Amino acid sequence: MSDDKTTERADDGPGNFVADIVREDLAAGRVPGQVTTRFPPEPNGYLHIGHAKSIVLNFGLAAEFGGACNLRFDDTNPAAEDVEYVDSIKEDVRWLGFEWAEERYTSDYFQQLYEWAVQLIREGKAYVDSRTEEEIRATRGDFHSPGVNSPGRDRTVDENLALFEEMRGGAAPPGAHVLRAKIDMQSKDLKLRDPLLYRVLDAKHHRTGNDWRIYPMYDWAHGQSDAIEGITHSVCTLEFVNHHGLYDWFLEAVAADPAPQQIEFARLALSYTVLSKRRLLQLVEDGLVSGWDDPRMPTIAGLRRRGYPPEVLVSFCDRIGVAKSNSIVDVALLEHTLREDLNARCPSYMGVLDPLKVVIENLEEGAAHELDAPLSPDSEVHGTRKITLRREVWVERDDFMEEPIKKWRRLAPGKEVRLRYGCLITVKDIVKNDAGEVTELRCTWDPESLGGDAPDGRKVRGTIHWVCAEGAVDAEVRLYDRLFTAENPMDFEEGGSFLDHLNPESVELRSNAKLEPALGGLDVGTRVQFERLGYFCFDRDGSAEAPVLNRTIALRDSWAKKVKSAQDQKNQKNQKKARSTKK
């Protein structure tokens, strides 16, 4: 970083036009003091991955240009806010690796905002409207027709001050009055058609209690809060572009100097994902997920519980860049970023999710062969671990096929297969229960193959994972997948909803999994790789004696095959329909 706090942006990698603007402002001397940004969440729900993009952007700007970033809670609607959300937001921001310069609340500025509103009334720039919300909306007009002035627009300053004091003091019930700015009901900018400044709410605020009965609207509180805090660059998502004129009008009306600069950027939209806080709340309240931190949710808390490292979210946000136009990011890019990180981070073990017992008949009872196995199948960075081969082991049930299909390379009658790092075994007999279900495989092993290699150099093409039965850790494993089956969950038929695309297979429970002994007693949040299966994270629902693990992600993307299969079926159906119509 140079002395004038400007930096050169590398030409490679994604762009960040907001950083370019800040860089130009600094070079032109338009920034009084240090660059100051803020992250302004509403404490009415948990943060999601879309908020992570804003967090990375705002805190990143402050860090890049030697400035500061505040965490400011937009707590102007006590009916929907809760301390639980405040605490979760602070936890999420810190988990992502950021620390704010100051912790602020819009409620800190309620008195100042109120005094500014009184100032607007005295200057003839605001008035009290006593009509209903429906009447106000009906006379607002649209892009093709002008708005109609409210009868309250002609009230005197004294009348407006008296009514506003009634609203402030609790004499006016909710819905009786609102305070509106007096701007221009003929304006082409609909936001300037006398917008609301205050409404009456009968709700206890989580910080101010019952001190206030009037609460500022977002547009009124937003820019003025920025000005009070000395924010130099107020970064918002694109849906606030049409608020820009109003933002500037309010700042000019209260004579904010210097006025913050509002910059809009494209919010994150992710395929196969819903990032509407209202719809996420619906999932929670309808019991379709277990809570805001359900590992299937795109909330930061849910992703953390699923096993995402914070570095993955930060890297993903940096990778997609900051743009001026909306677009949908393929969730596969997020999953690719996740796999890259976990592959380098996670030590490897073996776990069997649907166990089938194998008895190696010619391995002496009581015999134990200790073997070295790498903690990473691709590198030596994690070192090695000890595993033990005994007479009885567990293998995956779907690694055996009694009547194997063509090119089957796993367990089958008479077929030799490698137990990874262990030995070569051959199925000799199958044990079934009264229902005809396979309960046990009786096998033999080649003692000369201890360690997994054939002594005579013969090729054994099938290799499977396993866990020694003695000392195996019993665990519950939850296999999580995408919550929605549609690339755009909001694309639904008339009369339907985004819930029509819920994935009925978004979670699958394996309650009888068997894990290596080394996986007993690990801390909640520990991430590991199960060879051939994927990456997993220890969940808080488990204990040292009975761990619970969440699958963070499979080793490979299986959705491409699922989508192709679904498309092939659709094409076949359309072709069949076309042939039928032709006949």
Image (spheres, grey):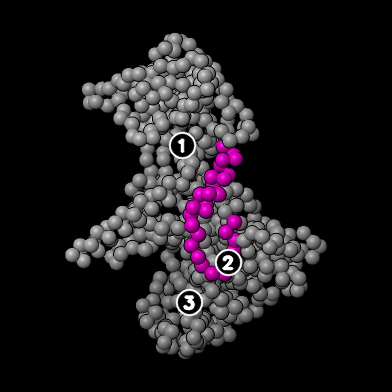
Is residue 342 or residue 33 the one in the foreground?
342
The relative height of residue 323 versus residue 357 in the rendered view (above or below) is below
Q: CA distance from mark 3 to mark 2?
A: 31 Å
Q: Position of residue 402 (x, y in %)?
A: 31, 28
Q: Is residue 323 magenta?
A: yes
Say if 279 sits above or below 201 in the image: above
Q: How many marks?
A: 3
Q: Considering the numbered disc 1 on the image, is that residue within a helix, a strand or a loop?
A: loop
Question: Can residue 570 be seen from the camera position used here?
Answer: yes
Q: Is residue 570 left or right of residue 366?
A: left
Q: Residue at x 22, y 26 (%)?
A: 435
Name the residue type under label 1: Leu
Q: Where is residue 151 drawn, in percent x and y?
A: 42, 88
Name the residue carrying label 2.
Answer: 323
Where in the figure is residue 56, as x and y percent of width and height? Answer: 61, 57
Front: mark 1 or 3: 1
What is the distance, in whole Å, between disc 2 and disc 1 at their CAs? 36 Å
Residue with the mark numbered 1:
533
Question: Which quadrant of the structure image shows residue 494?
Answer: bottom left
Crowding at mark 3 (Cα within 10 Å: few <14, some 14-19, many 20+): many
| Mark 3 or 2, closer to the camera | 2
Q: Secondary structure at mark 2?
A: loop
Question: Which residue is labeled 3 in the image?
Answer: 196
- Which kind of residue does numbered mark 3 sit on? Leu
Which residues are the magenta region? 319-347
Image quarter hosting the C terminus: bottom left
